[in-house]
Amino acid sequence: MRSKRLFLLGLVILIVGLMSAVVFTACGDEEPAATTAAPTETTAAPTETTAAPTETTAPAAGSFDGELVIGAMGTLTGMGAMNGAEHYWTYNKAVADINAAGGVNVGGKRLEMKLKWIDDKSSETEAAAAVEKLIKVEGTKIILGSQTTPINMAAAIVAEKYQAYHQQVITWTNMAREQKWQWNTDLFFGPDKVGEVPFLMVETMPEAERPKNWCILTEDNADGQALGDGVKAMAELHKINVAVYQTYTPGTKDYSSIILKMKQNNVDAIVVLISAADGITFTKQMKEQNFSPKYMMGWKGFWPTEYMSGLGNMSDYVCYDGFWSEDLGYPGAKELGEAYKAEHDGLDSVSMGLFYANVQILKAAIEAAGSTDPAAVRDQVFGGTFTGTVMGDITYDEGGVADIQPLGLQWIGGERKIIYPDSGVKMEWFKPWEER
């Protein structure tokens, strides 16, 4: 807990210092007038707010009563761009579907939703600057968040400063709750919950076959630290021997020393937090060094389709986390999945449901508030329940945080197989390279 707070304190100092040096020629350095301050106790949203797409007929071109411009931060470039591409497509798809169904009804006026995009460039510093630009230059004080805990937390600091509503996903929920935010909400899960998934997957296999020596490999940042702590706690709960705990710098090009360390410690199971680009490099070097553990699972980097398509059958038997599947039966999920595959050569996604639902929830909150005032919209989300999203029914606690169910999947023959929760599909051990 102390290390997380020290990290956040350092992050605040870094970001505030960097932002003071940023000059936006469109508006100078003056801060905008503050909106209504956050209340001590937010007003809870209606018990059930419908978020699912409606069946209304889209208005004719030009028949909207106005525009509703929402800020959207995304990882469009940098190391996280593979994951960010799914995020970008999905936010845009959700907005297009909303407009096709009649737009957003705000106090009886039909508004066409539009997104003002800005790139966080896979950087916490850039994320903070991006949110400040959205607020001070673009004038948007309702913002849809990006991906990963460090980027969203950097953005959240700026949103709190300017009292702009920042609706984020993919921030560890335990860390979000610690902040006691007034202007930020979060939809995801905690590192302990997702950190238990690999052990639950392995426990579906005969006990005599299970791996004996595990390695936890994480990025050397707040994201990695939080997940590493969660995985270690769950390893102890499941009586797992962690033979190696290793951190690495994102963007590393040579993993040979790390792989050698795993070999020396007889590691036969790996769990790793890694980007897709780094994950491809790491997997290739595992093959080059003929290192074949019995089990390997990755968070973040192994689930994008680019990982599978970039490696071909080298990705087979690799397990990974997920947030969503079109096969879970939620309203509109199957249609969303089919639309994505139609535009991506049949490839699918395990993340986009979370982003799509984030837009659905924002629309429902704005309509329930009957206003585009950021405080009024925020108050609908804090303590609110949103039914019928592509993620199912979502309930936020009074602090504006909602938890979802993590998935455990595996690549087999270029296809995704849901292993956890139990889907009836048996997991397969990681097959040695020479047997493929």
Image (cartoon, rainbow, N blue to C red):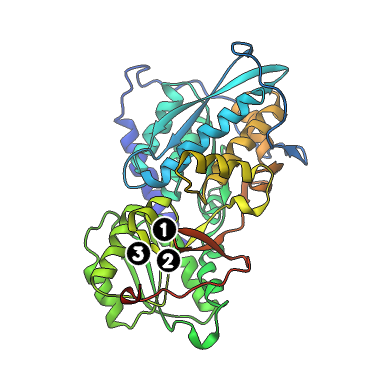
Which residue is disc 3 drawn over? 314
* Any part of residue 146 in sight: no
- Which three-letter amino acid code belongs to the residue tagged 3? Met
Choose the circle earlier in sequence order: 3 or 1: 1
Which residue is disc 2 drawn over? 318
Q: Residues within 10 Å of mark 3 (few under 14, many from 20)?
A: many
Seen as rendered, the residue at the extreme bottom is 208
* Any part of residue 65 in sight: yes
Q: Are marks 1 and 2 in contact (CB under 8 Å)?
A: yes
- Which three-letter amino acid code belongs to the residue tagged 2? Val
Q: In which quarter of the image is residue 331?
A: top right
Give the spatial CA distance, label 3 vs label 1: 12 Å
Residue 60: image x %, image y %? 64, 14
Residue 368: image x %, image y %? 72, 30
380 vs 4, nearest the viewer: 380
Select label 2 or label 3 by which is in front: 3
Q: Which residue is drawn at 62% across and 19% down?
A: 111
Vertical side of 421 occupied by 341: above or below: above
